[in-house]
Image (cartoon, coloured by chain):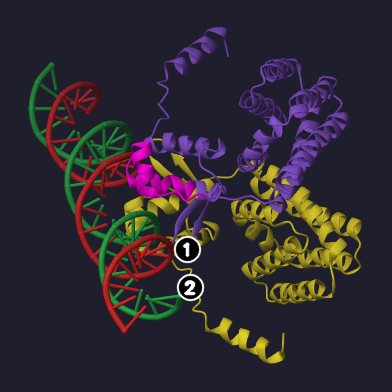
Chain colours: A purple, B yellow, C red, D green
Amino acid sequence: MTVLMKDNAENLAALRIETPPATLREIALDRMRRAIIGGLFQPGERLVERTLCEQLGVSRSVIREVIRHLEAEGLVEMLAKQGPIVATLDWDDARQIYEIRAALESTAVADCAKVAGPEIKAALRKAMSELERTSRQNSPVGVLDATTEFYKIVFEAGGNNIAWEIVSRLNSRISRLRVMTLSTSNRMASGPSQIRKIFTAIDANNPDAAAAACRAHIEAAAEIAKTILA
Amino acid sequence: MTVLMKDNAENLAALRIETPPATLREIALDRMRRAIIGGLFQPGERLVERTLCEQLGVSRSVIREVIRHLEAEGLVEMLAKQGPIVATLDWDDARQIYEIRAALESTAVADCAKVAGPEIKAALRKAMSELERTSRQNSPVGVLDATTEFYKIVFEAGGNNIAWEIVSRLNSRISRLRVMTLSTSNRMASGPSQIRKIFTAIDANNPDAAAAACRAHIEAAAEIAKTILA
DNA sequence: GCCTACATCTTGGTATACCATCAGACAACG
DNA sequence: CGTTGTCTGATGGTATACCAAGATGTAGGC
């Protein structure tokens, strides 16, 4: 392939009209998910369809399909003859989620540490600095987003996109817990330092150290969650 | 509590009208899922809503909500401006799924081996015999169901119901692969023997041996899947 | 013969209205 | 005070209508 042809291909690719992914349903799904994750709806709270229609300004069809999606995600539970409620979470569920996260994330960071090249490390470094910035600003949601971004890079770099799907879904189920653990005073400081350990190990292409740091990080989070839930 | 009272309580419990879990949507969901898993709809095939309405004899609302659910489960993909299609599966996806299964199932069997008491062992033994029976009868779907039952007991005994949810969902995505691997001649014989190894280790309350046997079992399955997909 | 332009069909996306059922609240009644 | 009937609200299920966008087909002009 000549340089000219490559340019041509790039130009053609640039021509493509990026389709607005904005189907009303997807917007509503995103809003609902954020509302639940952000604690706007309390666990166990009933989700009344027609009320949601007014609140989101969409029709019942949309709301119902969104609820089906959230139900499959585990964020919403259906009570027979009573309709949907926000899923509740007890310590036994949370315990399992932390265990699964530990398993999946530790292998993901190890995979990432094996293959990480300069550009991945740069991306991780950027996410790290964002994480530390939001941490200094005492912004729990900012820290959450930055942490998510960090892990997203890790999983994708290691070719673990399916595991990332699973972890994302699990995280949304314990998101309220995560915000609460972040609000724990000493956590706001210790979290970034633990993730920095993971980053350092990846930067040194040391899979074992990365996995160990990851496990330590999650176990610490689980420990705080336990005190909150139990 | 006297014996009489216990009888009374049991009688009252028997009085209860078991609520038909049969909301039309759930039936349709189950049918659709089985149809996809069973290969009635080919991967990549378009799922035309109005056609499905006729085929299932339900309205579009129901069909659409079912599709939302299946979409969240990963069995159906939405193509922008073209509607839903049956999700496709390449080797990279399957590879990851087998890896995650290996991680989750091996810890699950180890957990089960740690705590398994007589009643759990009896249940597993029953599932084992069912598995070997269907295997002798050369019934791939029977083997699949029996294997599922075996693992279900394992996960629940070890208190890993969340992991079971995840594994179930992953399994439905590779179900066609599983049927195909089962159809591989030597697999029909080797599968049960490998699971018997797991059972033996659990029966001996030997977590390490159980985990190792489980990993071997999944790796063998992945190997066959690879030859099919690649 | 080929290309264009228009009409039509199909499909998904959305909104709305209707019905039957059931749960919870509440008032009437003994 | 407890039982009973009623009413309202929420839900599941369904049907229908409208719109927008792609696909298809077809006729007309070059």
Residue B178 percent coordinates (x, y): 65, 57
Confirm or deny contact between disc 2 and disc 1 (CB under 8 A): yes
Magenta segment boundaries in residue numbering:
A45-69
Residue at 47 percent across and 51 percent down: it is A46
- Decide if residue C9 is on the left or right side of residue C13: left
- Compared across the picture, whether A17 is left or right of B216 comes to left
Callout 2 amino acid: Thr
Q: Per the image, is A127 magenta?
A: no
Vertical relation: D29 (above or below) A44:
above
Give the residue type that dot 1 points to: Ala
- Position of A62 compared to B134: left or right? left
Magenta stretch, main secondary structure class = helix
- What percent of the width, then of the height, locates residue B22? 45, 68
* The residue positioned farthest toward the bottom in the image shown: B4
In front here: A95 or D30?
A: A95
In this figure, which residue is indicated by the disc labeled 2?
A: B19
Say whether residue A63 is magenta.
yes
Quarter where residue A166 is shown:
top right
Query: Please, which chain is the residue tagged with disc 1 on?
Result: A
Crowding around mark 2 (Cα neighbors within 10 Å: few <14, some 14 to 19, many 20+) is few
